[in-house]
């Protein structure tokens, strides 16, 4: 429906996601099998896809799983990034996604360029241009170029994302 309550796209799909970046992931039932596709806001099909674990579009990219690796599609349904990592944050936050394996992680941009690589797991997303990371037991914030932006005086605290210019810092294990 649109914002007035008028039905814009008739209910005809087995499953629907949410619209984001002008596209919505839907599942179409055809006799005994199911087909995944992305539709536009007018209901027309943008493209079909057979990939596993298809995500929502953010920053022009949607996450999919190919051979147990995180990959990203463009709005034409073409694979434009293969991260060679099995796990991700699920989407691009402020144009940057974090992907990881059991022992390393990296931040990538929407083209697939590595912003920063870590020999440890870091799975924090960008918020207000910063992401909290840990390297060699030390916590700090990086900017979108991957450079250290904020060195933290207290390493005994747990740090969170920025919101309205502030980030929560708590004593580990407490509220």
Image (spheres, helix red, strand yellow):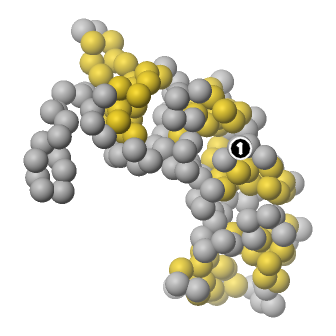
Residue at the spot 51% in from the left edge and 49% down from the top edge: 58
Give the answer, above or below, for where 6 lies relative to 120: above
Q: Is residue 8 visible?
A: yes
Left or right of residue 95: residue 102: right
Q: What element carries label 1?
A: loop
Left or right of residue 96: residue 149: right
Q: Whole-percent x and y of residue 115?
A: 80, 55
Left or right of residue 117: residue 48: left
Residue at the spot 35% in from the left edge and 26% down from the top edge: 45
Give the answer, above or below, for where 124 lies relative to 8: below
Q: How many marks?
A: 1
Q: Nearer the viewer, residue 87 or 40?
A: 40
The 10 Å Cα crowd at callout 1, few under 14, some 14 to 19, many 20 or more, is few
Give the answer, above or below, for where 29 lies relative to 122: above
The residue wearing badge 1 is 111
Q: Whole-percent x and y of residue 94?
A: 60, 61
Residue at the spot 41% in from the left edge and 28% down from the top edge: 46
Residue at the spot 48% in from the left edge and 44% down from the top edge: 57
Q: Can residue 27 be seen in this view?
A: no
Q: Quadrant of residue 112?
A: top right
Which residue is situated farthest in the top direction here? 31
């Amino acid at each position: 429906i649109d914002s007035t309550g008028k039905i814009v796209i008739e209910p005809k799909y087995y499953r629907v996601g949410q619209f984001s970046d002008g596209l919505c992931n839907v599942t179409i039932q055809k006799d005994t099998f199911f087909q995944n596709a992305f539709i536009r806001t007018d209901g027309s099909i943008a493209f079909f896809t057979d990939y596993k674990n298809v995500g929502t579009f953010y920053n022009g990219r949607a996450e999919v799983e190919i051979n147990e690796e995180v990959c990203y599609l463009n709005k034409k349904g073409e694979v434009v990034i293969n991260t060679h990592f099995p796990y991700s944050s699920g989407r691009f936050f402020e144009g940057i996604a974090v992907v990881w394996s059991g022992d390393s992680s990296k931040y990538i941009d929407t083209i697939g360029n590595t912003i920063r690589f870590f020999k440890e797991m870091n799975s924090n997303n960008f918020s207000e241009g910063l992401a909290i990371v840990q390297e060699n037991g030390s916590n700090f914030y990086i900017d979108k170029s991957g450079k250290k932006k904020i060195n933290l005086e207290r390493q005994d605290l747990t740090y969170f994302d920025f919101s309205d210019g502030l980030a929560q810092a708590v004593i580990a294990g407490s509220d």
